[in-house]
Amino acid sequence: MTTLPTAVHAAPRTGRLARLWRGRAEDRPWVRPALLGLLAATALLYLWNLSASGYANSFYSAAVQAGSQSWKAFFFGSLDAADAITVDKPPAALWPMALSVRLFGLGSWQILVPEVLMGVGTVAVLHAAVRRRFSAGAGLIAGAVLALTPVAALMFRFNNPDALLALLMTVAVYCVLRALERDRGAARWLVWAGVAFGVAFLAKTLQAFLILPPLALVYLVCAPGGFGRRLGRLALGGLAMLVSAGWWVALVELWPASSRPYVGGSQNNSFLELTFGYNGLGRLNGDEVGSVGGGGRGGPGGTAENLPAGMELPVRLGGGGGGGWGETGIARMFNESVGGQISWLLPAALLLLVAGLVVTWRAPRTDTARSAFLVWGGSLLMTLAVFSFMAGIFHEYYTVALAPYLAALVGMGAAVLWEERTRWPASAALAVTVAVTAWWAWTLLGRTPDWLPWLRSTVLVTGVVAALGLLFAGRVDRRLGLGVAGLGLAAGLAGPFAYTLATVDAGHQGSIVTAGPAGGGMGGRGPMNGRSAFGGQAPDGGVRAPGNGQAPGNGQAPGGQMPGNGQAPGGQPPGNGQAPGAQAPGNGQALGGGPGGERGGMGGGMNGGMGGGMNGGMGGLLNGASVGAEAKAALLKDANAYTWVAATIGAQNAAGYQLATEKPVMAIGGFNGSDPSPTLARFQQYVAEGRIHYFIGGTGGGGGPGGGNSEISTWVSETFEKTTIGGAAFYDLTERK
């Protein structure tokens, strides 16, 4: 195999700034400036219009706000500074944001800029990993592909744990690749890989371990040194992983339950149960106790018998026939729901993986180029298989985990085939890859036919021309060949680049978000997330949400329409045929007015007419609602006299009030409203001690408070008078009937 980097004579370097700009002595003069330009462009792209997302996912933003005020809440990942209950993940992904808010105050930029920095860091680490063995061009291509992947642009500007997870998985692969290079120093790099895996576990539990099997196997087979030494070093890396993740787990499990917050997402107040149940095997088999749309073994919110008559399980996304979270199978990553998020260059990555292994097949056992293809390819295939066949909760944005692996394979594979282009099989493989990529982009763009219709035909024609030219790339002038290769790269990146521009041009709020233009996700149904495509306003002309965490200004539920035909779950909503509190989601109205009397999307809307939360269903699930001045003033009155200024069903519902007031609000039942926390007896004790001011029920005049914790709701409605403040039902828990 041809050695890819080309050495040149470099000018003498003096000073750190000169070394930073010039890079390696053997690099051509353009190499380091091109990398710095890529990183700067990525930062600018991801920072563009960042505040349009407001507090993004208010569930995590509320926990960030709590962690910025209380070190105990920071450590546990509590949803409120008074430590009633935690988020349903470990807290590592919250820590950078909470530190930022502690330093600079609460706001959209303070929460989201750390995520942007993680995105830039991931591009830099990926470039470094590819560049070490392959050409500078390979590293730049890999970095550009990652930066322009639509779902990456979405999640590196959002406050879910996936940004930190993607960064740490890329770091882990980089460390394993360094360990594969030579026998000396390998143990140190495997220890660092173990640390990266351990911290990633503290970001998103077992998903961090998906790529462990292929990485361990490749090291065991392909690393230099004796087999016993390789095995011992793997064990050392495993120990580092256990320590870097286990210290926090041990403290939480050993900490007296009476003096720490309830572990959100669990049914027995156990982080281990959360890890191996709801966030573990439940994601694979769909048996998620306490979830919204999964199996649940009869757990709250998990089965149809817990929902109102005539209503089906909510949030059935991405297809049919495969369970509550979309159709499973090998085509899942290419379907109408997921394809536009991640799959633009996925066929190319798979083809180039095969090509790279063919080219390096006869290399020695320890060949680092082949090891790189095996490591990145194994990571891609393992994650791809799990995402394609998991029957539990699955969201489109999960696929950001695939982006670094995919991008690396594209960069490495293109570089290897380019170096071998004088051989017909290599030039033909390049041509086929470009042609298939252009055809698939043409197919994906056809799913949004009214959005940039000229781009679809342009990509196809450009790709075909480039593919024909690449057949003869090894037999023409180098500069002409480079021009044809550049044309092919442009054809491959044009579609995802356009989707990425549409993504950064719009705000995204809530728990379920997708990248791309309106109609580009969730099967192409309806305006997505109340956002525009290349516009400054929401689809009906409403103003996008400001940086206060409220839902899109046009009153649409995040995601625009409910899955299916635009009707409420199950076709007709209960009662009068309208969605609770407002109109059916298909007509562009939010589900309910939202607490505070303003249109708050899904957050809190269902808490009104259905008694709030549907036993842990959609009420308050998608995003925290906006809070009006009247409700905010009521909560802030004598706020320091109470541990919690209010309690309400569901974490998203609580988050809206907490972010508006920056005071603790108890989220009864956690995220879904289905966790058994607090018990009725504990809640009554809090009320007797005067620690909670208000219980906030549904919107408007929609009956009494409700939710998954029905005993608490019933007791409150029977014991305290209801008043309407800002359109929501408030119960003053200091004044009995």
Image (cartoon, grey):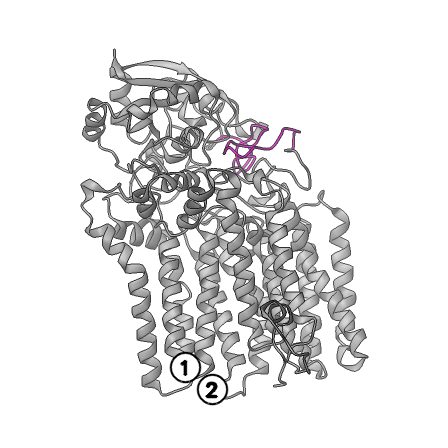
Q: Are dots 1 and 2 in contact, CB under 8 Å?
A: yes
From the viewer's side, name the closer residue of 528 and 129: 129
Residue 350 seen in the current view: no
What residue is shown with label 2? 365
Kind of residue at badge 1:
Val
Residue shown at the point (64%, 43%) measured from the top left:
505
Region of the chain picked out in magenta, as a range = 539-568
Is residue 66 rendered magenta in the image?
A: no
Label 1 CA crowd tier, 10 Å (few <14, some 14–19, many 20+) = some
Q: Earlier in the sequence, mark 1 or mark 2?
A: 1
Rendered view: 70 above or below 680: below
Residue shown at the point (27%, 15%) measured from the top left:
720
Residue shown at the point (20%, 30%) measured from the top left:
682
Residue 160 seen in the current view: yes
Label 2 CA crowd tier, 10 Å (few <14, some 14–19, many 20+) = few
Kind of residue at badge 2:
Arg
Rounded to the nearest whole Å, what is the CA distance between mark 1 and mark 2? Answer: 8 Å
In x, y percent, where is residue 526? 60, 37
In x, y percent, where is residue 678? 25, 33
What residue is shown with label 1? 221
**Residue farthest toward the top in the current orientation of the protein:** 737
Question: In terms of secondary structure, where does tag 2 sit?
Answer: loop
Is residue 551 rendered magenta in the image?
A: yes
Quadrant showing the C terminus: top left
In x, y percent, where is residue 266? 28, 45
Q: Locate residue 156 relative to residue 233 in the image: left or right.
A: right
